[in-house]
Image (tube, rainbow, N blue to C red):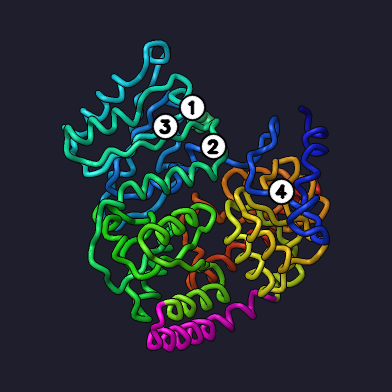
Amino acid sequence: MGNAEVLEDRKKFIYEKEEGCGGNGMRCDTDSVSGSVSQRACVYCGARVVLNPITDAFHIVHGPIGCASYTWDIRGSLSSGDELYRNSFSTDLREADVIFGGEKRLTLAIDEIAEKYHPKLIFVYATCIVGVIGDDVEAVCKVMSEKYNMRVIPVKSPGFSGNKSLGYKIACNAIMELILPHHPPKGKGINILGDFNLAGELWIIRDYLKKIGIPVVTAFTGDSSYDTLIKAPSARLNIVQCAGSSTYLANRMEEEMGIPFIKVSFFGIEDTASSLIRIAEALEDEAARQKAIDFVREEAEKLEDFLNLYRRNLKGKRAAIYVGGGFKAISLIRQFKDLGMETVVVGTQTGKKDDYEIIAGLVDKNTVILDDATPSELEKFMKEKRADILVGGVKERPLAYKLGIAFCDHNHERKHPLCGFDGVVNFVKEINSSMNNPVWNYIREEL
Ligand code: SF4
């Protein structure tokens, strides 16, 4: 299918605000259109996003070596303890294994890791080819768990079996398999779901919560470990940051462990402030609520002069947003609005109907809203809407640069945190220096 046909075929995916989400409105949370190379990653990659940050887990990729290239190096997350998760293991299946089966190779790989490192936890990812040849990965994991008295959890995630969202769900099921047998006594703490501590965000959020008197049991899964994760059932509340990857886990924990949850976001002043206050309210902790109100007021006041200075440069600029999940897109729209900027294009890889309804309520009716976009669509709409900056991830970066549009990395490759009050400073400085860089004058002249 050529570009023009794909675009034509996908017109039905473009949300017309007046029509709402049902009927002929936007379709989301579905598999990608056949033949269209969208910006989404595969099922296995989705699972790896969620599980990889567990710092003392071993991740064995059962499949050809290519799948194993998806490592910590291209999707970093920070640890305050173990660094084991930065290693990558693969069974490196070859032609003979495809013909005769790869279970023996997998058994040998687990044997080697168990004898050398004595881990508490191994995840075994079954990728595309294993889904085709039908290795009994579950049986191998069960036998090896018993042999070494450790947790070996299968993550059956062949890339072809759906989309990235399915990978998230499969990873959430693996986490439930890990924590369900544990019944620690109830405590005072909360769990943070959907934060992967890419650049230290978890430490910022944990520090804010500590300031208002709320302890954190564990995060799923940034800077987590086997020992912190199995304490998760002791939490009084789950807060869900990346809703796309973790709402399913939150629902299961609510149903099966009685832990309620609320959705939060720590991107931007408005969302950080309201999240801290809502967490205290959900815990019915009046002292924490009062501390949260005081804390967010002080922090917001500290930022006022800084923001006023930058607003002069940013006012009237047009932003395009293309990120993984809806929660981040929503926070970004609010942040741009606060800076006097307009969001002219906004899209996500795995946003849900609820997310798009909120997005539609926040943006102008002429804003283009996209789900599971292709590069051609992003290009077309960014040009049409004359975006000054694109906020996205590694796959969107070259697209922006080729079009002479400034870019801000809001994904897994960045090295500075963009969350909380600290993150506001980093974000504003980055978009200002990127957008107002004189290089664009020369590049745009060339195009
Ligand atoms: S699509 Fe299949 S082969 Fe490709 S990376 Fe994903 S699991 Fe591996």
In the rendered view, tell whether residue 1 sits above or below residue 78. above
Q: Is residue 232 left or right of residue 405?
A: left
Spatial CA span between label 1 and label 4: 27 Å
Q: Which of the 4 image quadrants contains residue 326?
A: bottom right
Residue identifier under label 1: 128
Confirm or deny contact between disc 2 and disc 1 (CB under 8 A): yes
Residue 415 screen position, x and y as percent: 46, 55
How far apart, in angstroms, are the residues tagged by discs 1 and 3? Answer: 12 Å
The reply to whether the residue tagged 3 has its Cβ within 8 angstroms of ligand 1 is no
Residue 194 seen from this side: no
| Element at label 4 | loop
The span picked out in magenta is: 283-311
The residue that disc 2 covers is: 42
Q: Which mark is nearer the camera, 4 or 2?
A: 4
In the depicted structure, whether residue 395 falls above or below residue 243: above
* Residue 113 x/y as whole percent: 23, 33
Q: Residues within 10 Å of mark 4 (few under 14, many from 20)?
A: some
Find residue 27 and name its label.
4
